[in-house]
Amino acid sequence: MSAWRERASRFLFPEDSGTWLTVLRIGLGVHVALYALSLRPDWNDLLSRSGSGLLGSALSEGILSEESPFIPRMGWFIDAGARLGVSESAVLTVTWICLLTAGGALAAGLFSRPAAILAWLLHLCAAKSGGFLNYGVDRFMTMGLFYLMLSPLPDRRSLDHRWRGQPLGDPELLGFFRRVLQVHLCAIYLFGGLDKSLGRGWWNGDNLWRALTRPPFDQIAPELLVRFKVLFPIAGIAIVVFETGYPVFIWLKKTRRLWLICIVGMHLGIGLMMGMHLFALVMIVLNAAAFGPAPRHTVAAEGLDDRAGGGLARGGLPASGSGVDSA
Amino acid sequence: MRRKSLYTAGFFLHFLLVVTVACRETIWVVARKLTILPPSVESIAADVEPAVEAALGRHLDPSNPVRRGLSTYWHLAGNEGGYGYFAPNVPSSFKLVFELHYPDGRVDSVLPRVSSPAAGLRVAGLLDEIGRTRYEPLREYMIRSLADATWREHPDAVTVRAVFGSIQLPTISEFEQGKKESYHFIFAYDFSRAE
């Protein structure tokens, strides 16, 4: 029992330099800023409750209240603003400015923890009040910001540490939160790949064709796509294999880099060929933070070089004799 | 040591929820015969589904604190659903067209309009949601909200007819034979100023 505990502890609490946290913070900071900028022209229309918007947040927030009154929503700020005599439009504009500012602060590493909490809260409020207007990117942003907010900020490259002299987090906790992100990504791809493998269309290329020709993802003319029809079954099967195999091959030293490149390539393809740029970016950021290699000089300089039995391998992951990156 | 134990317990509880929620979605699609799995597996999934729902507190009253607590947590953490995007199959897409009728008899057709491509992706998701919704009042409410938004941009129109349909995409071989996407009417709503 104690040997099992020891192994679990070595797996869950490896010492980590925190480079992954820098990647996550900067990546999500940039992502939050781009998210806010991309929605600026429609922000008030998407989130207005007064009926002047597209769908109005009243319906989403009503359904949300049935689920739980404690789930954050934009209505909380709008109600608070109304008590102070501030219009809904002004409140929404201020929340947008705060979200953009939080994204910028995160990218710079200034007031990292408050910025992470603010970005998580405001994005969550927007996503929940937007309700029916959400898609995958919102869930992955919530997930990434949730973990970032809980992680031991600030990181080594943040302005909080460099300028303001704030102490760094515990290396074991840094390792723990990286493990959480890693395991969650494995669950995401395992179930994503498993669910795809159950559809015939992913084995014969039909689903890939449909995904690329389905409005509004039809960024490339079907006349051009059909010239590459022989590749569709191969690419469809490859996506299933990359995703389902992720929880295994991303941990093996020999295949980690290849798998990471394949997954990042898949997301780049989704971004470029389907116009889902923000979705692609958030997935690439999460993958780079979770499994991206730490520069060798960083690991050495930080005194956390490769060690047998629970130390750091080049990827910031624990070394093991078997080549499998687990305790 | 105590701190590590707390973090470890949190880790296992968190991922128990993540995996259970993801399993629920997989079991849901299998139970509804949307996969290539044989009928025997589909019936097993249908049998297992209530147990998974119960594990997630779905059988509890909506006001039950455990159900609300679980629901709040997975919304806060971004874990409220599974990860089967475009799985097991890519669904049809939907199209909503507003026919604007003017006093002089003129009729204009317009689509729901947003200002940015980022919002355009979200509207497409909304149309998918409308297409999947079986609850008629909710569907009408959503269509009416979109019609109202369109109406504000065309205040001279006296009536609006909202026509909702699905777009059937050709397969690769059908496309090669010259078949194009086709539009299938599903339902329509008429709205007038008096309503």
Image: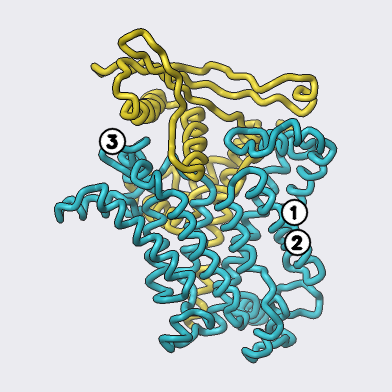
Chain colours: A cyan, B yellow
Which image quarter: residue A200?
top right
Q: What chain does badge 3 belong to?
A: A
Q: Nearer the viewer, residue A291 or A47?
A: A47
- The amino acid sitting under disc 1 is Phe
Q: Position of residue A99 (x, y in %)?
A: 38, 60
Q: Are marks 2 and 1 in contact (CB under 8 Å)?
A: yes
Residue, x 52% and y 33% (percent of image)? Answer: B128
- Toward which corner of the image does residue A316 lie, by quadrant? bottom right
Q: Nearer the viewer, residue B126 or B34?
A: B126
- Disc 2: which residue: A259
Nearest to N terminus: mark 1 or mark 3 = 3
Residue type at tag 2: Trp
Q: Residue at x 30, y 15 (%)?
A: B158
Q: Chain of mark 2?
A: A
The residue under the point 30% across, 40% down is A58
Coordinates of residue A184 in the picture (x, y in percent) = 59, 61
Does label 2 or label 1 sit earlier along the sequence?
A: 1
Determine contact: label 2, label 3, CB under 8 Å.
Answer: no
User: Relative to B155, does residue A95 appear above or below in the rendering?
Assistant: below
Q: Pointer 1: what residue? A: A242
In this view, the mark in front (2 or 3): 3
Side (left or right) of A186 relative to B96: right
Q: Position of residue B8 (x, y in %)?
A: 54, 73
Please tell me how crowded label 3 is: few (under 14), some (14-19), or many (20+) other residues with Cα within 10 Å: some
Q: Is residue A291 above or below residue A195?
A: below
- Secondary structure state at the residue bearing disc 3: loop
> Which type of secondary structure does the marked residue at label 2 adopt?
helix
